[in-house]
Amino acid sequence: MSYRLEQGGLRIDRSRRIGFSFDGRGTEGFAGDTLASALLGTGRRVMGRSFKYHRPRGPVTCGADEPNALVNLGQGGRAEPNQRATVTELFEGLTATSQNRWPSLAFDVGAINARLSRFLPAGFYYKTFLWPRSFWKHVYEPVIRASAGLGRPPEGPDADRYEHLNVHADLLVAGGGVAGLQAALMAGRAGVSVLLVEETAHWGGRAVIDAATDGARIDGQPVADWVAAAVAELGSMANVTMRLRTVAAGLYDHGFALAWERVTDHRPWDDAPRHRLWRIRARHVVTATGALERPIAFPGNDLPGVMLAGAVREYLTGYGVAVGREVVVVTNNDDAYRTAHALKAAGVRVPAILDVRSGVASGAPAAAREAGFRVLERSAIAKVTGGSSVEAVTLTSGETIICDAVAMSGGYSPVVHLWSHTGGKLLWDETQAHFRPDPDRAPLAADGGAAATAAGAATGGLTLAETLASGGQAAQAALTRLGHAEADAATIATAEPEDVLPMKPVWMMPAEATAAQRQKMWLDYQNDVKVSDVQLAQREGYESVEHAKRYTTLGMATDQGKLSNINGLAILAQAKGEAIPQVGTTTFRPPYVPISMGSIAGEARGGLFQPIRRTPMHALHDEAGAVWEPVGHWRRPFAYPQKGETRDEAVQREIAQVRGRVAMLDASTLGKIVVKGPDAGRFLDMIYTNMMSTLKVGRCRYGLICSENGFLIDDGVVARLGEDEFLCHTTTGGADRIHGHMEEWLQTEWWDWQVYTANVTEQWAQVAVAGPKAREVLESLGGLDLARDTLPFMSWTEGRLGDIPARVFRISFSGELSYEIAVPASRGPELWRALRRAGKPHGIVPYGTEAMHILRAEKGFVMIGDETDGTVIPQDLGLDWAISKKKDDYIGKRAQMRPHMADPERWKLVGLETLDGSVLSHAALALEDGQNALGQRRTQGRVTSTYRSPTLNRGIAMGLVRHGPDRMGEVLEFSRVTGGTVQVRIVDPVLYDKEGKRQDV
Amino acid sequence: MSEFLSRPYEGFARVEQSAPRAMVSLRGDLGSQAMAAAVSEVSGCAIPEPLRLTQAAQDDDRGGGQTSGQSGAQHGGQYGAACLWMSPDELLLLGPAGTGPELAARLTEALAGQHHLAVDVSEARALFRVSGPAAREVMMKITPADVARMGPGDARRTRLAQIAGALWMEREAAIEVACFRSVGAYVAELLTTAARSGGEVGLLHPAAT
C-alpha cells in the first residue's frame, strides 16, 4: 500500500491542496504533484490494465518512460487518451479515467485473457486467424480490436489551440539536468545564443533528488543551491533562452530540431496555446538527455508495487510518497542503495537488499551493511507473489520475504535517441552493459563535422562528478565547433568522485529460469511481451532484432521501448548465442516521446487549414449565389444557380446565354507570366512547341508547353507586348508551375540567355465577355475601338475601357465572339459591375467553369487535366498544327521522337457520339474483343471529357481511341458505370461551328 | 486595395492592414552602374545589400529608426520610398500609392539599353503591419526566417505558414508583411491568430520560468 509521508517532498507544496477526480471519484493531492504521485499518495497503485492480458498495472517509473500508468485525461473537447500519469502535472479540477478495463479497473472481464495467456503467445494473431481468410476482416479483427487497445480516441473538435515557433540558435542544449546546465552556462558566458530545454517542470534532473539522500555537493555547495544559482545566472543572460516542460523530441539534418512545449497542460484554464512546437535551427546541439533505469526480468515483475528503484526514490524525495510500507530492493548496481537509504530515512522498512553481485564487501553494499541493512549477495528473486499487488517475494534460496513493494534496478541506459536520430553511432559498454554514444562517430553536420555532442549521463558517465565534467567538455567542444575560443576548463564545476563498484548485467532472474517462470517475466509491460515471447520469436526464425520487434510487438508500445529494448535484445542475443552488440538495436526514430497531433498541425485548422485563393471579384460571386469549385487552391464559380434552379439547369442556361447573346466569366485565375529580354523570343521558341518569336507585336498566339519527356503540361495564349516582351497566359493551376519551369530552364540550362520572367497573375483581374453581343456590351462602355478590323481575332490592345485602364485580348475559348479584359486587380469589382450594367439590355449573366468546359468541348478545344493526364503528347490530341516543323528544337521534341511516342498505335483524340444521345460516363473505356495478359477485357480507347450539350441537345464527348482519326464513323462499344455498354460513333471532335466563323465576326 | 482586415487587431502585438503602396519588381544586374543610377533616380534609394533594404532620405526629420508601435491611424503617410533586396537579380521598389505604373515606366526608360525587367506588381499584393515590442514573436510563429535577429533595414523573402511572402523592417518594432492578394484573407487570419493574447512566448524578455 502506497501512502503520503507526514513530511518531505522537494517538489510539492503541502500548503496547497489540489482537488481532482480519478474514475469519477474526487480526491486530493498537493500542488507540485504529478497525477501518479497524487494517486500513489492516496494509496492507489493500480492505474490501468495491460494491452493484451488486461493485467492490473501500476506505475513502474516516474517519468516519460512509463509504460503502465496511462489514463484518459479530460473530457469533451479536451479528452485525450494514453496520457502518462507520471508526467501529468496535477491541477485543480483534473479528471482522469483508467483505460482498457471493463466494467471497472478493479474487476475487468478482459482479464480472462491472462488465464488464456498460454494460448496467446507472440505471433498468436498471425498464426491463428489466417483461415478462413474473410473471417479476419469481419470477425477476428473487430473482436480483437474491441478487447485490446488502450484509450478511446476523443470525439469532436479539439477545444485548445496550438502553434509552431521558429527559433534560431547557435547552440541547442537538450536537457536541463546538471550536465545541461553546466554546458549552457559555459556557452552562455562565451556569448553564443543558447536555447536550453528541459522536459520536466524542474531544473537539475536526478542530481537534486539524489543529493537529498547522499548529500552530494557541487563546488562545495548543496546541489540544489548550485542548480538555483546556475538557473539564475542563465536567466540573467540575454543570449540564453530557457524553457521548462519542453522536450527535444527529434533531431534532423542540418541542425534542425523539434521541441515540444506543454504550455498549459498544468494550467488549462489559461487562454493560451496548449502546446507549442518549436522548430529549431541550431548550429550545434548538446544532447544532455540523461539515462533511463532498466527493470529486471523476474517472475511477477509486472505486479503493481514493483517499480524502478530510482522512481521509488523520486516519489519519496520529490513528492513525499512511499510506494509501500515494506520495500525489498533488488539490484545489480550501487545506485539502488540510495533508494534503500532514502526509504530508511523516511521510516519505510527495507526487509532486504538483494544484490546479484558477489564479493560486495566495499562501497555502497558495505556502507549499507554498516547502516544496518540486510544485504543478500548473489541473491535473486524466484518470484513475486500477490493478486493485484505485491504481497511477498520468494528468493532463489527458497526464503520468502513479506513485502508490499519491490524497488528494482537493472542498471542505466543512456538516452541516445536524439544522438541516433541523424545517424550518431553507439558503442556497447561492457562495464556498464549499455549502449552509449561513440564520441568519434557523432551525427554529422553539412560540413562533415559533428552536429551534436553528448553530455552528462547520456554519455554513460553516471556519477555526479562525471556528468558535470562531460557537461563542461561538451560546452568546450560545441564552442570550438562554433568558432569560439574554447572555454576555460577551470570554469567547469566539480563534485567529489564516487567509489562505485561495477554493475553486473542480469537479463533474466533467476538465470536458470524454467519455461513457466519465463512466461511471467515481463519485458514490455504495456504490450505484455515476456521473455518467453522473445525466445519464441527467435526459435521461429525472427532473428533480426527488427523482425523480433515486429513479431512480438516488443518496444512498440507508447513508450517505444524505453524500458524494454535493451532487456529484450539481451534476451534475443542470449537465445541466438550472440553478443549484444552483434544483435544491435532497433532504429531510434523521432519523436522521443509522443507529441500531440494538435501541435503538429499548429495553426493550420479551421479557416487556416489550407490557404484559399480568392479573385478580386470573389465577394461579388458569393453575392450572386455562385456554387464553388476548387481549382488548385483557387475557388472559382462552378455556376450561378438562380432561384429555383438546379446546378445543372444553371449550367445549361449559362451556355445558352453565351451561344445566344452574351455572358461573362471571371478569368482572373489564369496565369500571366511576363517574359522579357533580348532572348525572350528565342526562349519562348524553346518553351512552346510552336513558333513564338515570329509573333507580331499586338498579336496573340495559342501555344503548347511540354515537359522534357514530351508530355503536354500546359497551354495558353501568348501576347506579344513589345519587341522583347511577351505575356504568357497559363492554365489556372499552371501559373506557379510554369513560372518555375521557365525559371528552372533559365537558371540551369540557359543561364547565359538574356531573359527575365515575372509572374504577374495577381496584378490583374480578368473578365471574359463572350457571345454574339460581346462587342456591343464593351462598346457601350466606351473608350476603345473594338471594331472587327481594328482589333481582329487573336490580337490585343490597351487603353481605357470606360474609366478603367485595361488590356483587351480578342481571344476565344468558347468559340463565340469573345474578349478578355484585364484591369488592375483592385478595379476588378468595378469592371465586373460595369459589365453587368452595360450588358443588361442583352440579359448578360455570369457563367461558371462548368459552362466554360462544355463550351470548349463543343468546339473540340482540349483542356489540360482532362485530355491530358501526364502521359499524353500533343500529337495524341491532333495538335500537330501547333508543333513547329521549322524549329531545330523545343523542350520535349526529342522525347516525342522516341519509338513509343511515335508509335502509330497510340490512342488519339476523336469526338464521340452516343447513338442513343445519352451522356457517356466519365473515363468510360472503349471495349475490344479478347483479354489481355492479366485476363482483363481488352480496351481500345477511353473518354477524356463528357458532358450534356444544351447547344446540340445530346451527350457530347472527347476521347482517345486507337487509330481514332482514321476510323471516323465507326461504331464502338463503351462501358457504362451503371453496367452494360453503349454504342458510340467516332466523329470529329469539333462539333460546333467547324469553320470558326462565330469567333471571327 | 481590398480590405482584408477591417480594423486593427490588438493582441499581444498589433496587426493591421497597411495602406497601399506602389510596388515594382525590378530584375537586372544589381551590381551595374546603370542599375544604381536608375534606382537612385527613380526612388532615391541605394541598391541594398543581400537580405537588406534601403530607404530614401526623407525631407522631414522623422528618420527610420524611431519606434512606432503607435503608428496605425496615420499609417502609410510616414513611410517613404524603399528598395528591398529580393534575390541576387531582383529588387522590390516601394513608393507612394498609385505610382506603380509610372515608377515601372520610369525605370524602364532609365534602363533603356540595359537588359532588365521592371513591372508594376502593386495590385498583386496585400500589405500588413505587425507592430509592438513583441511583433517579432508573432512572425516567429509563422515564418522560418530568423526574425528574432532582424532589425530596421532587414528584409526577407520567405514563407508565411503555407504561402509565399516577404517581410521587412523599415523601423524598430514594426514588421511589414507582403503576400499575394489572393491569400490576403488567409494572411489576415494567420497574423491575428498568431498575435492572439496569451500566446506571448516571452523570448524577448528572457527569464528563467
Image (cartoon, rainbow, N blue to C red):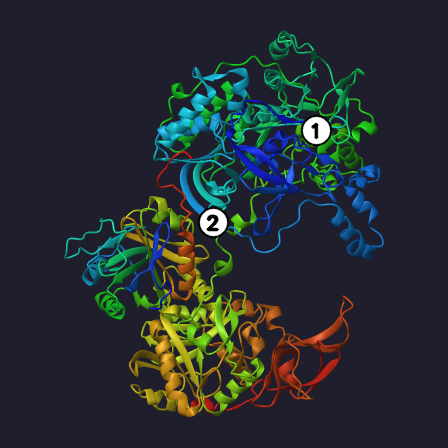
Residue in the picture at 57% in, 31% down: A415
Q: Amino acid at mark 1?
A: Ala
Do discs 2 and 1 belong to a common subunit? yes
Residue in the picture at 58% in, 86% down: A949
Question: Where in the figure is residue A461, as x and y percent of width and height?
Answer: 54, 22
Specify the quadrant that holds the C terminus of chain A. bottom left
Q: Compare residues B113 and B142 and report the one nearer the observer.
A: B142
Q: Compare residues A485 and A522 and report the one nearer the observer.
A: A522
Question: Where in the figure is residue A770, as x and y percent of width and height?
Answer: 44, 86
A525 versus A918 height, above or below: above
Labels 2 and 1: the sequence-earlier one: 2
Where does label 2 land, which residue?
A163
In space, the residues marked 2 and 1 are separated at their CA atoms by: 41 Å
Q: Quadrant of residue A886?
A: bottom left
Look at the image and tell me whether residue A331 can be seen.
yes
Label 2 crowd (10 A; few <14 / some 14-19 / many >=20) = many
Question: Where in the figure is residue A601, as x and y percent of width and height?
Answer: 52, 52
Where does label 1 land, which residue?
A570
Residue in the picture at 54% in, 21% down: A210
Chain of residue at mark 1: A
A788 versus A252 height, above or below: below
- Closest to the camera, between mark 2 and mark 1, is 2
A992 versus B117 height, above or below: below
| Image marks 2 and 1: residues in contact by CB distance under 8 Å | no
Disc number placed over residue A710 in the picture, else none: none
Label 1 crowd (10 A; few <14 / some 14-19 / many >=20) = many
Look at the image and tell me whether residue A258 can be seen.
no
Q: Amino acid at mark 2?
A: Glu
Q: Compare residues A444 and A545 and report the one nearer the observer.
A: A545
Question: Where in the figure is residue A115, as x and y percent of width and height?
Answer: 83, 37
